Every structure is written in C-alpha cells, then in structure tokens.
Amino acid sequence: MRHIISMLMENEPGALSRIAGLFTARGYNIESLIVAPTEDASLSRMTLVTSGDEAIIEQITKQLNKLIDVVKLLDLSKGPHIEREMMLIKVRAERAHREEVMRLADIFGGKIVDVTNTSFVVELTGKSTKLDGFLDAVDDDLVVEVVRTGPSGIARGNRGLSI
Amino acid sequence: MELSGAEIVVQCMKDEGVEYVFGYPGGAVLHLYDAIFQQEELKHVLVRHEQGATHAADGYARSTGKPGVALVTSGPGATNAVTGIATAFMDSIPMVVLTGQVPSPFIGSDAFQEVDTIGITRPCVKHNFLIKRVEDIAETFRKAFYIATSGRPGPVVIDIPKDITDPNVKIPYEYPETVNMRSYNPSAKGHSGQIKRAVELMLSAKRPVFYTGGGVVLDNADRQLTDLVRELGFPITSTLMGLGAYPGTDPLFLGMLGMHGTYEANMAMHDTDVLIAIGARFDDRVTGQVAEFCPNAKIIHVDVDPSSISKNVLVHVPIVGPVGTVLSDMLKVVKEFKKDHNRKAAAKWWKQIEEWRSMHCLKYNQNSDQIKPQYAVETLYNVTEGDAFVASDVGQHQMFAAQFYKFDKPRRWINSGGLGTMGFGLPAAMGIQMAHPGADVAVVSGEASIQMCIQELATCRQYDLPIKIMLLNNGYMGMVRQWQEFFYEGRYSHSYVDALPDFVKLSESYGHVGMRIENPSDLEGAMKEAFSLKDRLVFMDVVVDPTENVYPMIEAGKGHNKMHLSPESELV
C-alpha cells in the first residue's frame, strides 16, 4: 500500500543522504521524495512516498525515527490529509492541436504558462491521480517533456506536524 | 581558558573522563598528536593498524561499559577503521571514533589522503559529525558521547578537518554541562500497562522461557535479570552476546540458544508457550527459520530500541524501555500479584527440560589422542577458575568458547557476534587488559583469525600487556571447513590454511613467550605455566583435532527442533 510520510528534520548537511541511505541499505522503496526549508530555518520538511505492507511501513517509520536528524514524523496516509503534486508538461501544439490542448488544460484546471509557435507548457496541480489522468488524456505523440515534483501533503484539522 | 582546536579535542576527552585513546598518527591528525604529546593525563596507546585501534577501543568499552575512544588519520586511516566501527555498530557498543580529515578548503578536491569518511561510515554508525568550526568542537563532543552511550548504544564518528585543530587559532573553552537534542530522546522507562500485561502472561505460562541478549549486558541489568528469573524459577537461555548476564553455572540456565545452541535451549524455544525476550534482537542465527520460530508462543519483548521490536518476528507484548528498569518494574509487579504461577505445569515443564538435558548435547570424545578444542576450552576454564576475561575471534573456536566457558559474570565474554569479524580478539584483548591491568585476559583464537591482526603483538609488547593467547590450531578455517563438509560434500575449497608461520618463533620475535602444545596430557600443565607468567604475553599454539565439528548445529533457515547432533551425544 502507498504511504505518504512527512518529516521534520534538522536542516543539516547530510540529513538527506542519511534518509536516502537508510532506504537503500534496508531495501525499502522510495517512489518520490521532496525536501524544502520551512518557516523555521533550522528545520527542513521532507515528504516521502513509499509502499509496503503494514509491517514494512512500521519498520520504515521506526527506522526513520531512529535517525538522529529526524525530529518528527507523521504518516499522512493514516488520516485525512490534503495531497498535492505539481506537473509541468511540454506538449507539441501545432496548428491542428492547439485547440485540443487548450481545452484539455482547461478541463483539468491547468494553466498554459508558455506558448511558442510549436509548443505549450501546461502547469497542473492536484492529486497525483489527477496528473496521471491528464497524461492519459493527452495524445502520447504530443508529449515532449514531463516534469513532476512528486507529492507533498499536509494533514487536515488538528492533526499535523510541528514542534 | 583559551585553547586551540587540537587542545580543545584533548580537553573534551578529559572532560568526558576518557582514560585511553587507541590510535595511529598521520598527516591530518598531527596537530592533535602534538596536543596529546604536551599533556599526560590522557593516555594514548599506539596500535599497529587502525583496525586494531577500533577493536581495542571496543574491547575496552565491552569490558568496562564506558565508551571506547579511537583516533585515526584521514583517508586510509579512516577506511581501515571501518571494520572496527561496523563491528561495534552491529553489537551496539558505545564508542567514539575521531577521524582526521583534510583541511576544510581541500574537501572535495580529491586531496592527498582524502576520503568521504562521513559518507563511508554513515551506514555503520549510530551517528556521525563533520566539524566545521572550532567553536563547534566542544558541543559536538558532548553530543557524540551522549549519543554513543545512551539509549541503544553505538559508535559515533567525529570527522575533524586539519584546519579546525590549527594550534594558532585559540578560542575560549567551556565544556557544555548539559546536552539538549530535540530529535533524540531515548526511552527512560517501560510502559506500566504493558509491563502488567507481560507479567500476567508470564504468570499464566505453562512452558515459559527467558531468552536474553546483549541488551542486558549493555544496560548493566544482570542483577535485575537474575532477581526476576530466580523469583519466577523459569528456565533461561541466552544469545551469544548475552552470555554472563545470567550466571552460566546456575541450574536455571539452559546454555546458549541458536545455530550452535544447546539441545535443551533450542527445544525449549520450540515448545515454549510464553517467550520472554529481553534485550535480544531475534537475529537469524537465533531464530533459524522465522516461520518455525517458537510456533506456539506468545512473545513478550523488552528492548530500548523500538525498531528492534517486531522487526524479524511479530511480538505480542512489546515493551520499549531500558532493560534494567523494566526488569525491576516487572519484579515489583510479580511480587504485588503474589499469585504463584502454575506449579504443576512448571514441574512438568522442568521434567521435560531435564530429559532434553540428559542427552548431554555438548559431549565430545574424551579419549582422543589428539587435543579436542572443547577440552582446550574446558582446561582454560578450569585453569582460570572461570574468572578470566575471554576475548574471542570468529569461527569454531568462538562457538567452543561460548559453549564450554561458563560465564558467571557479564562483560567477561568479549566477541564479535553481529558482524563476525575475524581478527577482533587480540586487539580487543588489549583494550580489556588496559582497563583491567591485574586481571587474567585470554584470547581464544584460531590460526586463521589471529593472522588478521597479528601485528598487534607489537602493541602488546610496547605496553607490556600480559595477554594469554590460546590458539586452537586445526590448520583450517574450521567453520568454513565444517560447512563444506556438511553442505558441499567435503569439497574443502580454500579453507586449508597453508604456509602457517611458526607461532612460537613468531611470538618470540615480538618479545613474547611462545609455546606449542600437541599432546592432551601436556595441556593443563602448560596452561598453568602460561597463566603463572603474570607479566608476560604467552602465545599457546595448541594443535587440535582438525576434523572436530561444532555441535549441535541448526542449518541456516531450519527450525529449532531440527538439529545436527554430535555423534557422542546420548540420544533419548
């Protein structure tokens, strides 16, 4: 099963490699991983998507918690949460296809952020499944380049991750 | 007080109460060595190879419970230390390893003797630090020693670029009194509800057994363990790492369990209905086939490291906390309940265990005209009256020592259990002897293992360490040979140790006493003589039967009730 694990970690050099190293050393799977600073300069926030059965996810969270640089950890998928991923997609948009791409972008709530004679860049934000849906909807032959951030997320309501 | 970075490093160690630092100099640590030279309090022990430094620091730590300290230079100094760091990591030994690093401006330039020590050691340390400013040294040391010794202990590496120790840059020094880490808070106490649940389960058991490991030794919880086990009268078995935490000569003790554990211990594990695991981590050498491990048992597991719980085997009553306090809390609850457990069931269980015991699974041929390795260990046990520190290398001799030397005290049996590092024994013994100057320190080794760190015989000479080496010389990597006999139809691929040195001459050339013993009837006398030489290292090259195997043996991946038994044991 897919899990989104959100972590606050010390903003120290090497913290990221400790986490990445743990996953390779123990044979766990990383689907995506994003890190960025937080409002507190001493902390970074990482969102990591992994998959495994209950026992594996329990081990992953325990092993992550054991790392000295990990301050706090939350398995977002264990409760209600918002999940968002951003995608930039460059599509061929020559005369015949321009209308179709604009319509699709509109349906999916995307924005066209770059226009040339021959191409569009569409920016799309949403749950990963929605981005998958857009990719399915666009003719494969039109897709030039796809850049996805990987999901980030936040818990709803009182649940959350702060120190 | 204004000090240079190098002086601060030395002062930090003094403030941590470090007595000995085991090390080897080199370019990146020259400032540090100069600071060491200019003081007397902190004693430096010069080893002959950085692996020896880490094992010696490790042996010091294992035998005292205090953190061991090693100091090595950058590049090859650091990589040579990695085996010792990984050895300590696998057995959760508190250790602080200082590695020199090229000057900060050169980091990343492939400078002479540069290696990414932080990167290389990351997977085999509890934590590591790269110091970037002189001002950070004191706080880093405080944190490093705290991390190494608290919770589940482990090695911590501090990588120190040469410019940080510049003797010309002096700053005010103060060692931090407290350490505050928001991301590291090891558990201080077990959950009382879980402890109560565990005790209820224990008191309702019909066929209980304690399974204890190195965690009991690490937490100095031998007293608490012994009190609880004796109060309950339950049988107890121990892992290789836990030997000595409960007296090995006590009738409740079933001997070691696992791959080369006793018949009674493994059968009790297989048949138990309540398994009480204390400070043990369900290693594959203990569990064998996980699907067949304690098939009928409810499992209680006490461990200070939450990630040890339900890692390999699903447990029913997990208790996260320091072993010592949890054990004494358990004893209190047992006494409060005042409800005796099922005596009738206990009597039946013990009757069964005695039946297993009567098979004498460790029996060996006592009438051989060759020295049996088991006999050699028994003789060592008798001559040292069971009270020596015994450091071991890795292989058959290690298993024979674990089976036949009955450790009644913790921190007497010093071996590399997790990583299985050949070459560990001799340098570890140096650390032990340094920490316990008057004590009998024996190394049980083999002719293959000992050659992996043989150069440390020079260190022993330089510091007059009167270690007694008992080499069980069978001419083979015995354990490899045994597996080849059992599982590869006797194709002894590269397990014969050819071109052995004359160990007597070799030890003499290092300035030690050498003996070669070939006859069983000479062994006891020779060993007594060796141990009577209180101020000399004696190297006993004991020629043993090359065909002897370690029994009982559970093949890797088999259940506990499927043991290869010695031809000598009495089938019941």
Image (cartoon, rainbow, N blue to C red):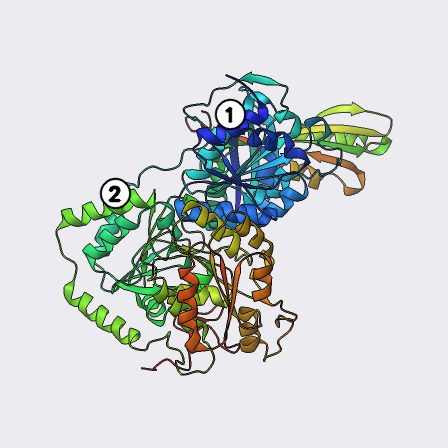
| Mark 2 lies on residue | B193
Element at label 2: helix
Does residue B181 sit above or below B59 in this rendering?
A: above
Q: Quadrant of the C terminus of chain B?
A: bottom left
| Mark 1 lies on residue | B138
Q: Is residue A127 visible?
A: no
> Which of the two residues, B295 or B360, is positioned nearer the viewer here?
B360
> Which of the two residues, B236 or B445, is positioned nearer the viewer here?
B445
Residue sitting farthest toward the left: B338
From the viewer's perspective, is the residue at label 1 or at label 2 nearer?
1
Q: How many marks?
A: 2
Lower sequence index among marks 1 and 2 = 1
Q: Amino acid at mark 1?
A: Ala
Element at label 1: helix
Residue A95, image quadrant: top right
**Residue B389 position in % (x across, y down):** 40, 55
Q: CA distance from mark 1 to mark 2?
A: 41 Å
**Left or right: where B538 falls relative to B230:** right
Q: Is residue B117 visible?
A: yes
| Tag of residue A103 | none
Does residue B381 sit above or below A89 in this rendering?
A: below
Does residue B301 sit above or below B562 in this rendering?
A: above
Task: Name the chain under label 1.
Answer: B
**Residue B498 position in % (x across, y down):** 65, 71
Q: Residue at x 15, y 64 (%)?
A: B343
Q: Residue at x 45, y 24 (%)?
A: A163
Task: Name the chain under label 2.
Answer: B
Query: Mark 2, residues whose alpha carbon is within 10 Å: few (<14), some, or many (≥20)?
Result: few
**Residue A9 position in % (x across, y down):** 53, 30
- Asked if marks 1 and 2 fall on the same chain, the answer is yes
**Left or right: where A123 falls relative to B323:** right
